[in-house]
Structures are given as structure tokens and as C-alpha cells.
Amino acid sequence: MKPVEVIIYREYEQLLKEPGRSWVLVTGFPGFGYVGTIATRYLASKTGSVKIGDIVTKYMPDFVAVEDYGVMTPYEIFLAEGNGLLTVVNNALPSTPERVPYALALAEWFKNVNGSRAILAGGLNVKLREGEEDFRWVCNVACEWGFKEPALSKGNYIVGPLATLYTIFTLKKIPTLLILPYTEPGKYDPSAAAVFIRELNKILNMSIDVGDLIEYSKLVAYAKALIEEASKKSKEDKGPKLYM
């Protein structure tokens, strides 16, 4: 198999490529405040999205969990057809060697299904706050979205798979917006995820209620604990000869 492959359930393949359709992609990762994962899982749930596929990587974490919609896997793709929305929920971080292949595979797939623009969710360390704003943002040349809040200040870094994905999407000429609510790096932060969802409502003309985010973040925390436990068990089973 390829190092990273996007696998879509057969019954949705034609729908995604129908003439005249275009899609907005929303995704993020479990980074600072776990904002990207909390926000995207909540978005998929509140828009009534259906799971249509997975991103499969060579070294992806070996876990699954049962959810209301079926089986939760490390990297999931959801569709809200009525909203023209594709949501990629990353329940885990791609391993470091796989982050560029992951971003390239996702970008190529998105372009092949007539993807129009992408919105990425991340968290920004609250220590970098300079005023009263709730978030900062970055937009590549073609994204055409903007806010009254200030953009990310010169000299501040975006790191990790979110930075890689933003870079690849920009190089592939996919209009991309990155929204970075302020957060405490070491804790689950549903309030930061709520900031992201509220801004998403504005630019996509949606009305997703953020009232349930606190409770929902507890489910995400529980899922993360299960993932870590499964990962630890996997390493123990492989014994001391496992090298990174």
C-alpha cells in the first residue's frame, strides 16, 4: 500500500465528484488545548455528518472504539452534504515521518473531489495574547476570508502537523484559513473549541450551538485516555526490541 491512503466508502465516491458540487474541508489535530480534535468531532456531530471514509497510514495507532455512528478510527472523514462540508477528525497525531505524506495525500484527494477551500483549527498559547482578542488567524493568498481580530503576529510560529498541512495546502494552491483560539496548552479546552465553532458559524452561515461543548470535551478526553492505553499496551506487547 501507499505510505498514506485516503479510503472512501464506495457508495460516496460518485457523490463527492458530482459536477457542480464543491466542498469546504475542516480539520485540525490534537495539539494545544486539544482544540482541533474537540472542534472537529463536535462539528461532525452537530451537523449530522456521516462517516464516509478513513485516512490510513503505515504507522497509524492500532486502536478502534465503538461510537454512535459506528467505529471510531485514528483519522476519520465525515460528510455533511447539505452544508457542503467535509470534516476530517484526527483522533491521534500522525507520526513525524508520516506528516508530509499525510498532508500530500489529503491535499491531492481534496483537489480530486472538487474541494474549494479549507479551514484548519488549532490552539495558540494564551501567553501570546496581546489584547482582548479570543483568537488569531492566518490566511493564504487565495482564501478570501478575514476578521476584525488581528492576524497572527510576525515572529510567532505554528508547529507540528498543522503547520505541515497548512504549508502543503498552500503549495497545492488550496485556499486555506487557519483559526487559532487562545488556549492553555496542557489541558482540554472546550471554550477555545467554542471560539472556533462560533467563527465557523459566521463565515459558513451556520448556526451550531456551542452549549454542549463542555460535556462533549469530556468524551474526547475519555477517548484520548483509551487511545493512550491501547498504544501503551501495543508497545508492551512488542517488547523491548521495539525501536523508534
Image: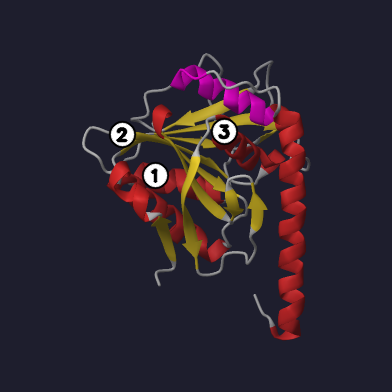
Residue 193 disc label: none
Report the residue marked by disc 1: 169
Circle 3 sits on which residue? 43
Callout 2 amino acid: Ser
Q: Could you tell me residue 192's position as x and y percent?
A: 68, 29
Q: 10 Å neighbourhood of mark 3: few (<14), some, or many (≥20)?
A: many
Q: CA distance from mark 2 to mark 3?
A: 19 Å
Q: Amino acid at mark 3?
A: Leu
Q: Quadrant of the N terminus?
A: bottom left
**Residue lying at 48% horizontally and 62% vertically, measured from the top left:** 56
| Labels 1 & 2 near each other (Cβ < 8 A) | no
Residue 220 belongs to the span the image colors magenta: no
Instruction: Tell which of 148 and 9 is nearer to you.
Output: 9
Where disc 2 sits, the SS reads loop
The percent position of residue 223, horizontal first and vertical second, equals 72, 50
Q: Is residue 51 left or right of residue 42?
A: left
